[in-house]
Image: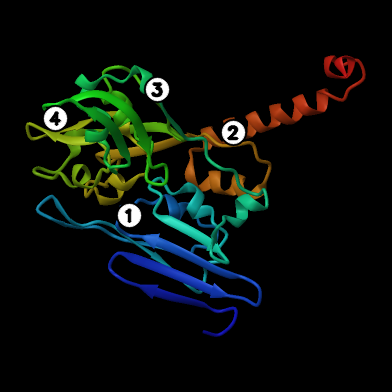
Amino acid sequence: MKRGSTVKRETKDQLVLERRMVTRQHILELDRTRCIGCQVCKLACPQGAIQLAPAVLEDGELKTAPLVNLEADRCNFCGECVVLCPFNALRLTVNGAPQVPVVEYGTFPTLVKEIAVTVEQCRPDCGLACQEVCPTQCIKATTEQGPDGETVRILDVRVERERCIYCVECAAACPRHAIAVTKPWQGRLLLDAARCPAGCHACADTCPTGALRMQDGQLMADERFCLYCGVCQEVCPATEGRGALGVQRQRILHAEVKSGAWSHALERLISIKAQREELEIQAQARRREAMRFLPGSRVMREE
């Protein structure tokens, strides 16, 4: 490998870009077993290094999901795609350790996403609903069994956060309201089922959660579980005019950051109205910070 150049390795389940420098080695990995071919990473990439091959449909059925490709000659290993991937399909390491340079240098925020389980509220008669419905199988309950093999107590509920996609399905299924989930993406899912081609269920085939599903031959939407990833738009053949499906990303919950890189990413990811609201929130925060140091301000008096 020539020093400073990027080498690309690809298998059915994985795509790897590697760049070796004098003191640094960058490796960006795409796990295709987790990737569903949504458009978030492609939209986020500031270098245009991510391309998306279209889905393959046959008689309204999804045969091949959209395929993400990483272009070695364009990627600069910034890590914006890693931060924003809704499915934890991208991983970046620097010298063998997980690291995201844009976060490390303070030019990009981490997303606000959380899942909390109050085990004290769990009861064995729930049928371990959270574990059963989890689409990524990232929830594992530890139980105490009775003499007949029945569950008599739930001892612990662990969440593998590297796999969790914060889809809220576990929280909705829990009969004891013992799980609280904060989704980082907010928006709207628009569905006009009357525009769906007859017999088509490609969007339901590819939806990673229960946001889109077929019921009695009809396409149904449950926006509680929508991640606003946009893969349904990618596979939907009814794209003429208004189309049958639409995803509007309105807000991304994130840690505080002041940077042009984040502002540019928002321009590509969310609506213009949402961008204005985000800028206004940042402006208000700057004004509050400035007010702290004005003579006679409450903060100054307290100090």
Task: Residue at the far bottom: name it.
Answer: 2
Q: Secondary structure at mark 2?
A: helix
Q: Secondary structure at mark 4?
A: loop
Q: Is residue 79 left or right of residue 282?
A: left
- Residue 195 vs 100, above or below: the answer is above
Type of amino acid at the residue the image marks with label 3 = Thr
* Labels 3 and 4: the sequence-earlier one: 3
State which quadrant residue 209 falls in. top left
* Labels 4 and 2: the sequence-earlier one: 4
In the picture of the structure, the residue carrying the numbered disc 2 is 278
* Labels 3 and 2: the sequence-earlier one: 3
* Labels 4 and 1: the sequence-earlier one: 1
Q: Measure the alpha-carbon separation of dots 3 and 2.
A: 33 Å
In this view, the mark in front (2 or 1): 1
Please name the residue shown 38% across and 42% down the image: 160
In the picture of the structure, the residue carrying the numbered disc 4 is 149
x and y percentages locating residue 283 in the rendered image: 70, 31
* Labels 1 and 3: the sequence-earlier one: 1
Is residue 220 at least partly visible in the picture? yes
How many neighbours does mark 3 have within 10 angstroms: few (below 14), some (14-19), or many (20 or more)? few
x and y percentages locating residue 27 in the rendered image: 50, 67
Q: Measure the alpha-carbon separation of dots 3 and 4.
A: 24 Å
| Tag 4 and tag 2, C-beta contact below 8 Å | no
Type of amino acid at the residue the image marks with label 2 = Glu
Q: Secondary structure at mark 3?
A: loop
Instruction: Kindly identify which numbered label has been placed on residue 118.
Output: 3
Residue nearest the observer in this picture, 132 or 107: 132
Type of amino acid at the residue the image marks with label 1 = Gly
Please name the residue shown 41% across and 50% down the image: 88
In the picture of the structure, the residue carrying the numbered disc 1 is 37
In this view, the mark in front (3 or 4): 4
Q: Measure the alpha-carbon separation of dots 4 and 2.
A: 53 Å
